[in-house]
Structures are given as C-alpha cells and as structure tokens.
Image: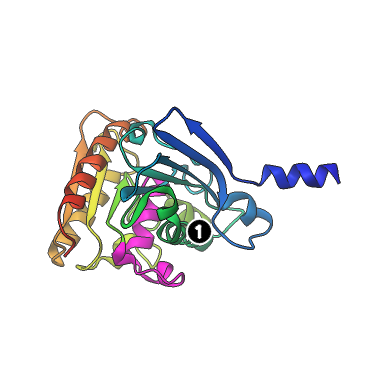
C-alpha cells in the first residue's frame, strides 16, 4: 500500500513558486486515461506569470532525434511575460513516429483547452521546438489531420516557429526503413509534403548552413521557397551565422519573442 501511495504521489502535478512573479506547475498529464509508457511520457510543465490574464503561450517541444530528450523550460523564454508549456512525448523506437506526432497534437490541444487557467490566451498559442521538436511543431501545424482528431483547427495556432527542424521525412523514420541520413525522402511524414498557403504564420530559424547537421538550413530554405510560391502570406527564415545545430537555440529565442510581439499586436487575418 505504501508503494502504491508513493507511486500515485509521484504522478501528481507539483506547483512551484518562483519568486513573486512566476509559477511553475510540473508533471501534468495531457492524455486522460493513458497507461504504461504513454502515462509516463505524456506529461508537461507550465511556467506562467502570476496574477495575469491574456498572455501569449508558447508550447515547446524538446529535441533529441525523436529517440531521446526531456522537456524543459528554455531559459531564454523565462521572465518574458509569456506562459511556456514544455512537453514530453513518446520516443522511438519504443513508440512509432505516428505516436510522437499524435502526442504533440494532444499536448497542443490540451494547451488550447487549459491555458486560460494559467493566464494564457487561447488565441495566442504559438507552437515551437528545437530539432525533433521543430519537426513535430511543423507536422501538426501543416498536416491538419493531427489536431483535427482533438477538435482543434491547426489554423488557430498563432504561429509555427521551428528551430532547425526537419521538413523532409525525419531521419529517425528513414533509419527504420534502412535509408541513410543523407538520402532525402518526402512522404506523408514530411512537413514539406503538406505545404499550403493557409497555414499559420511560419517562422524558420536555422543555424549557420556550414555548421548545421545534414543540410538542415538548405532543406528549410526550400520549405521557405515553397511556402512563398504557394502564396503563404507570412513566412520568414533566419540563418544564425556562426551557430551550430545546438548553439543556435539560445539566440533563436530573441527571434521567437520578436514575432510573438509582432503577431499579437496585429489582428489575425
């Protein structure tokens, strides 16, 4: 009985008071009735300004090649007047790629439904992430079926902001199929496959093309061009000179905050 009680306590959300201005609620489940591995991984933290309402929300997906990584609140997004939802998701090979994407969609749907409790505005939900997290952000924002499953229109996302995310089919999926990391594939699991002019605003952030992994800048530049060609009205691309795949995250936060400010000061079209 003691072991069961300890296990139940370990799964309960924890409120952390951070000074007078911010709060952090840790380890909240975003899938009702999840069991086993899903119950373990499908959890999130919410960092938010205390005693405020109507703030912008950033749903943040960690990187790790879809095979590793843990949720965290990025330091560069703290103390910026926004609510941050940091998400864990199931990982390959224990889960399928479709499970990873579905978890991302479920977490974003949770944000739309619950952010008001933490001072967030459901009309100001931005979806971002680094590397594999950027891939997940793009997939659920461009391929509308993932969020539609949870009753959310992907176009209600305020903007997609992938940091050095794959836009061709993710290399973890290609590796499962015996395809090299340097052999590109574009299928239904590629954000590039789902390019459309009516997608949410799309802000691409990449490291230096000579420092990035696997031609990441160039594939994102192609994504930028395709969105422009189909008539997308708000797509931007940034190359952070001198920053490699990991180091580009910290300066990328400045770009995210800039576009959050711009997009929340303009009426949605």
Which of these two is toward me, 114 or 108? 114
Magenta highlight range: 128-156
Camera sees residue 245:
no
Which of these two is toward me, 185 or 164? 164
Q: Quadrant of residue 217?
A: top left
Q: Secondary structure at mark 1?
A: helix
Which of these two is toward me, 199 or 151? 151
In the rendered image, residue 132 lying in the magenta stretch gets the answer: yes
User: Is residue 196 left or right of 32 when viewed as pictured?
Assistant: left
Question: Which residue lies at the image location 16% right of the left edge and 50% below the top edge?
Answer: 265
In the rendered image, the quadrant that contains the C terminus is bottom left
Question: Which residue lies at the image location 59% right of the left edge and 50% below the top edge?
Answer: 41
In the rendered image, residue 3 lying in the magenta stretch gets the answer: no
Q: Kindly identify which residue carries mark 1.
A: 103
Question: Which residue lies at the image location 38% right of the left edge and 48% below the top edge?
Answer: 119
Q: How many marks?
A: 1
Magenta part mainly helix, strand or loop? helix
User: Is residue 265 left or right of 53 when viewed as pictured?
Assistant: left
Is 77 situated above or below 132? above
Looking at the picture, the colour scheme in use is rainbow
Q: Quadrant of residue 206?
A: top left
User: What percent of the width, then of the height, locates residue 5?
Assistant: 78, 45
Question: Which residue lies at the image location 44% right of the left edge and 43% below the top edge?
Answer: 62
User: What percent of the width, then of the height, locates residue 138?
Assistant: 34, 57
């Amino acid at each position: 009985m003691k072991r069961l009680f300890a296990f139940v306590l370990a799964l309960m959300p924890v409120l952390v008071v951070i000074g007078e201005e911010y709060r952090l609620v840790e380890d909240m489940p975003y899938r009702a009735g999840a069991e086993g591995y899903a119950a373990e991984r499908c959890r999130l933290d919410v960092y938010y300004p205390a005693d405020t309402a109507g703030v912008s929300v950033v749903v943040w997906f960690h990187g790790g090649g879809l095979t590793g990584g843990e949720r965290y609140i990025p330091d560069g997004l703290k103390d910026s007047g926004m609510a941050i939802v940091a998400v864990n998701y199931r990982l390959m090979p224990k889960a399928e790629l479709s499970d990873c994407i579905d978890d991302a969609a479920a977490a974003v749907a949770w944000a739309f439904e619950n952010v008001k409790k933490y001072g967030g505005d459901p009309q100001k939900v931005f979806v971002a992430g680094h590397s594999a997290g950027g891939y997940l952000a793009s997939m659920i924002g461009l391929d509308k079926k993932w969020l539609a499953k949870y009753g959310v229109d992907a176009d209600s996302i305020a903007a997609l902001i992938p940091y050095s995310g794959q836009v061709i089919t993710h290399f973890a999926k290609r590796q499962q199929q015996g395809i090299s990391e340097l052999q590109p594939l574009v299928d239904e699991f590629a954000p590039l496959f789902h390019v459309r002019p009516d997608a949410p605003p799309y802000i691409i952030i990449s490291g230096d093309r000579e420092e990035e992994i696997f031609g990441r800048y160039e594939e994102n530049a192609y994504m930028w061009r395709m969105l422009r060609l189909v008539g997308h009205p708000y797509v931007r691309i940034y190359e952070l000179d001198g920053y490699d795949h990991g180091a580009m995250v910290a300066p990328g936060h400045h770009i995210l905050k800039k576009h959050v400010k711009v997009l929340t000061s303009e009426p949605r079209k």
